[in-house]
Image (spheres, rainbow, N blue to C red):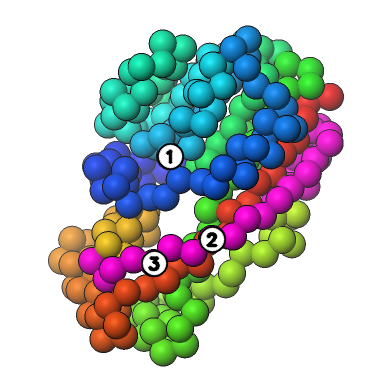
Amino acid sequence: MPKAYGEMFDRAVLTYEAMRPGYPAAVYNDIFRYRPIDGTSRVVEVGIGTGQATLPVLETGCTLTAVEPGANFAGMCREKFRAYPRFSVVVDKFENFLCADDNLDLVYSATAFHWIDEEVGYLKVRRMLKRGGAFARFANHPFPAKDEQLFEALQNIYKAYRPDAYTPPVEYTSECAKRCALLAEQYGFCDVTYQIYSRTRTRTSADYVALLSTYSDNLAMEEDVRRCFFAEIQAAIDAHGGRITIFDTIDLQLARKP
């Protein structure tokens, strides 16, 4: 993760905690079927954020170490999961994290692994895992509104504020998940599999703007520009009923160390 973006995320910790969604129970069920986890297991979470993907793993009784570059995120999670004595957080980039080889039963990362250089990340995960250990990579891919009029209004705002960087959003598909899953084979993993899950979330215009304030491209805007951008987004949603439905696709890739 670029240092500037990491610092921006860490400043948005309270909004991030309030607005970023968790993940469906089916994701964890599929992970634990693939690699059962219990009180004897050692697990690392890469990029804990504010812990949206942490509790279901902690509840297995495992020893869980989270690696998180943001000090504020780490501090929130230490407090949030203080009832779990086998939980700890290391404040560092995953690339710098020290861990013995052949040591872990599971490494997982939720909407965070894309910040890590592909070759560095996959090879490091493979070294850290025991034989038969698993890597679970999953992420949420939101698609903003299928109402054609609202969608067009929002995209016009994005085009106006990002004329050189605008690309139209596309929905994440099973083929996208497959391509991501097959990356693991390039780095020596086996038994590669993938799955996608769907859900919808409906938010008020104010909540949607709060959610947008947790994304790196928006955090990178100049403050005055960002304020105007958010005001226009909120006005567009208010002009179309005051609520927006977000269509989420969550993908899960699983791979095993031979």
**Residue 77, relative to residue 172: is it above or below?**
above
Q: Is residue 209 visible?
A: no
| Circle 3 SS class | strand
Precedes in sequence: disc 2 or disc 1: 1
Does the magenta portion include 252? Answer: no
Q: Residue furthest left?
A: 224
Which quadrant would the N terminus be assigned to in this image? top left
The numbered mark at residue 213 is: none
Does the magenta portion include 185? Answer: yes
Which quadrant would the C terminus be assigned to in this image? top right
Q: Report crowding for label 2: few under 14, some 14 to 19, many 20 or more residues within 10 A (C-alpha).
A: few
Residue range in magenta is 180-206
Q: Report crowding for label 3: few under 14, some 14 to 19, many 20 or more residues within 10 A (C-alpha).
A: few
Coordinates of residue 206 in the picture (x, y in percent):
23, 66
Report which residue position mark 1 lands on: 52
Coordinates of residue 181 in the picture (x, y in percent):
73, 47
The numbered mark at residue 199 is: 2
